[in-house]
Image (cartoon, coloured by chain):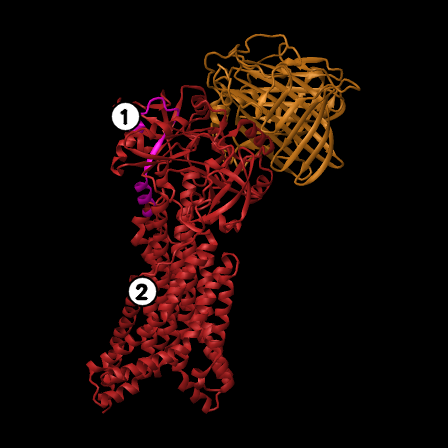
Chain colours: A orange, B red
Amino acid sequence: MRWLLAIGLLILVACRPATERNNRSGIELLTSPAGEGFVGADRPRRFVFPDDHGVHPGFRSEWWYVTGHLFSGKRQFGYQLTFFRFVVDPAEDAEQAWESDAVWLAQVALSDLENGEFYTSEQFTRELSGISQAALQRLDVQVQGWRLYQAAADPADGARPYQLRVVADEFELELDLLPDKPLVLQGDQGWSKKSANDPMNASYYYSQTRLTTNGKLKLNEEQFEVRGSSWFDREWSTSALHARQTGWDWFALQLDNQHELMFYRLRLEDGSIDTASAGVWVDAEGRTTRLGVDDVQLEPTRFWRSSDTDSRYPIAWEVSIDSMDLQLQIEAIIPNQLWNSRLTYWEGAMKVTGKLDNQPIGGLGYVELTGY
Amino acid sequence: MQLLLALLGVAVGVAAVVAVGAARQAVEDSFSRNLQALEGSVTHRLVAVGGVISMATYVELRSNYPLLPMAPVIRERARLIPAGKPHADDFQRVTILGVDLISEAEFSDQKSPNTGLLPGIESIDIAAWLGGEPLALIPAGISELVENERLDLFWRGQQKKLTVAGQLNQKSSIASDVIVVDIAFASRWFARNGLDSIRLRLTPEQVEVLTANLPDGLELRGNSDQSGLSAAFSLNLVAMGLLTLLMGVLMVFSTFRLLLLQREPLIRLQHAIGSNPLSQVIDAFTEAILIGLLGTVIGLLAGLGLAQLVIGWIQQTLSDLWVTGFNDSIRLTRGMVIQAVLAGLGGSMLAIAPLLWRIYKTGFQVVDPAANKNRWPILMGTLLVILAIILLFGSGGLLLALAGLFSATMGYLLLTIPLLAVLAKLIRYLFNWQRYLGVVAARRLLASLRHTTPALVALTLAVASIIGIGSMVNSFRSSVTDWMDVSLSATAYIGAEGQELPKSLLDQVANWPEVNAVGWLNTVSIQLADYRAELSIVELPEAGQNSYRILDGQSLWQIADQSASMVMVGETLAARRNLKSGQTVSFTLAEQGLSVTARVAGVFQDYRAGPGRMVMLRTALSNPPVAPAALGVYLNDPGQFGLLRQQLDRLPDLPLEVEVISATEVKAETLRIFDQTFLLTRSLRWIVALVALVGITGALLALQLERQAELQLLQRLGLNDNEQRRLMLYEAGLLGLVAILLALPLGSMLAWMLCEVINQRAFGWHITVLLLPEHYLLAAAIGMLATLLAGWLCIRISAASWQQQHATEVVTV
């Protein structure tokens, strides 16, 4: 869902420094139409890997997104890393340095779940070879030293883990992420519609829903060897949020039984839910079941009010899918996981409890809430 | 009345200290505010020794320091053709700055939104800036040159049309010729594949890390580094503040001493009736603290008012120095409060402590009758003078030099105490042939010394400070003028901002009939062990070969072999690296990596700011730069400068924007800035004079009050009111005369110390001390005026007091 944030990026924040608090919701400014000359995500396409891990010139916005839960002894952390790419001018004819018309926003957050601390850091920069760029046809994204890339194949087992390196203000992350399951093409074979009223409003979207994660975390001079599980999303598009849409709630849950659930709910200005809202259920073997707006019931059960934005965010939910006999209670592990810099949204680590087929089940996840 | 005088003395002493401190603070605030307005939160700049920072280096820096705010800059000069003037000669030269707005946003200061190069950057439409037609941000001053928001710019014959997207910092007059464009546009137009500089915001810790890991060929420069002139100005105000502090302490000391002296009979009486000396000491101590505290508070407020007054006088003149104008708002800093307390309370304690000790020990005597024979001032004074000699003639740093200045001044003042009596006797002897009143006044002067000595010493210091500081400023100005007269030997100088000139230009210019000769100059960075300096490579015609005033050794042109590996060293560099003529020096040309070993032929006078430089003949370098960075043009007739400028502007096919400036313009501008910079120093002399006035008034008044009985006796012996007034004026005049006579050597000494030691240690500059009679006359006039005014004030106050007393006597009868 973050492509919508990316679209709003320039319109909303332009050159605003990160220190300035932005009290406006990004959603209201997300409706600017793309200029002429961009390629649209207007039909299903054939995905080819690793090519589609790379950048897709011609599209207006693109993002690479990783969330996960990390453990080190009794300590538990949540993390999130996003690289947004946004193109201003569709004629990307950069031959010289500085000539690219793309800009990048990279955001990283760490939730120290034991101590209730939420750390964020971000970088906003124009595209420049060697500094802020993404490779074509392979996974290698970097923004001023922060990098997400796919390593060369391990000669022993042929595994090609994703690698993530970030040095933020207060913490550093160095993680290897090894996919446990095949890639999941969201929507219609990766073509993900985002508006019931505008069939052209869509993106290309795939996910790696579970990656075994190992690595190091340095937090305020304290070193941790960490392990855990991550979720990787990729999306690119040209279209913008529909004028009637006011925001979305996005859920990415990893259950103990190796199943995963992704669902996004698009909210309309009249309080109703856009019927383009959708999701996917992934079983332990990686088989997928598409979920429509009527398949999933979502009910907020607890709210948290931010003193910075004076907005109320639903940080606990009841999620049920009757067809699967699934009832989940999800709750933010710490309430304040609000991003309030160039963009304002709540995105945080969640704890999941509930029942599946009447059997107790638990899990962890991430939720993104915008437009509040 | 006595208490009031004491309070006034403390307050004025403190006020002087605070006023000088506050005025200096105002200047420093203006400097900071100016910097803030121009640079926002940018603290440093990275520049390349070779002129251009490669993109590879920028990428390396960005990757190694991902969270460091840094903004790349490309800089170039171009011509702006004003709207409605299509003629090619009607242009204005402008500086084009190619910037990355996204990086620049990191420097936008939310607390001061109207500062920095690009205030209001948040409102710029970044999508239009990056993606559409070329946009420009222009200074307010050139908006009338723009038509329909379109700018016509020329660079190397290429014309570009830009659309105005907004205005730059409104307050910035320095940036009045700067046009900001996107870095991609600048890079493409100027065919640049590198950067001219990188703007940074660094903490001191980051400076340390970055300096230690700086890529080769880069130099980190701080934005807050003051120009040589500003730094010299600040330093001299520090010295002035030090002298004022000393004066303040002396004032307070004098005040309390007088107060206690006047209480002496009472103290004796109390002792005679069996009062405990300890209780007297406690009472006096409490009183001193209360007066000291109250005087300090009043002095603080009065000092701020005085500073505001002085700043107000010169505000308009100083405004030109900074783009944000001169900061006329005065503020109190912690340092100033400490100095005020030190002068007010510290001076009070210093004054009463030894006196109280005497009271406690002897029971009644405030001053030892044998004080005149006391040798401790001579002993202490001699010791301080010896210490000063060691500090001033040794090889210590600036702080030790300032300590030397302080020691020398204190030492001299202590030594003047026994001298006062000698001088007073001499004056009495001289006045023996005088009329009756003169004899009485001279005798009274000698008799009153035990009361007036501290005030006289304070007056001596005030007059000496006026001489010393005035002479220093004048010597500095005169040396700078001489230096410019010698070193700017050409009629005009041609250069192109930060770039080398085309090789062919020298021949072209030399062939113009009005040109007599052309000199060749290029400056490169050199590495002297771990120190970075500059090397000027020159090839000068005969007319320019005397443009270096040699302080030690000989000039390069006095050496027969012009290809010998010889250098001349500027005095700044010579002082910093301890270089002398005859020594051998090895250095590396930073850009070329070429190692050179050369003998120092001589050291020349050099007031240029920066790390310092050496000069070498182009013919002496095995691999000299091929193109000059500047040309010195010697015209047959200096009046033809306008013609030279015209011809240069019309030169076809020049690959860059060359600019020409006459030596006269350089000199005039330098002296204008000099005079504006030191205007405050000159103005602050009046505060020193005010201290002198109040100090001597207090001393005289106390004297008159104490001697009312003696005056009444003289009245009864036939002294009329007119004679009485004249007597007091004579007395005041004689006091002034003594102080002035003693101040003359001290003032000269202060001038010498400021020029030859303080400025030399701080900047390596050799300033020739110029002691002009007008400085002595002015100081003497101020000193005499202060004492006569004090005498007149005494007459007025005493007259009122006599009348009151006379009326009382009549009523009693």
Q: In the rendered view, tell whether residue A87 sits above or below residue B440.
A: above
Q: Residue at x 42, y 59 (%)?
A: B754
| Chain designation of label 2 | B
| Chain designation of label 1 | B
Badge 2 amino acid: Tyr
Residue B651 located within the stretch drawn in magenta: yes
The residue pinned by badge 1 equals B89
- Badge 1 crowding class, 10 Å Cα cut-off, few under 14, some 14 to 19, many 20 or more, is few
In the image, which disc is placed on residue B359? Answer: none
> Which element is circle 2 on?
helix
In the image, which disc is placed on residue B776? Answer: 2
Asked whether the viewer can see residue B173, the reply is: yes
Q: In the rendered view, tell whether residue A140 sits above or below residue B668.
A: above
Q: Position of residue A170 (x, y in %)?
A: 62, 38
Mark 1 or mark 2, which is nearer the start of the sequence?
1
* The magenta segment: B647-671
Res B500 → quadrant:
top left
Q: Residue at x 71, y 34 (%)?
A: A76
Q: Position of residue B538 (x, y in %)?
A: 43, 37
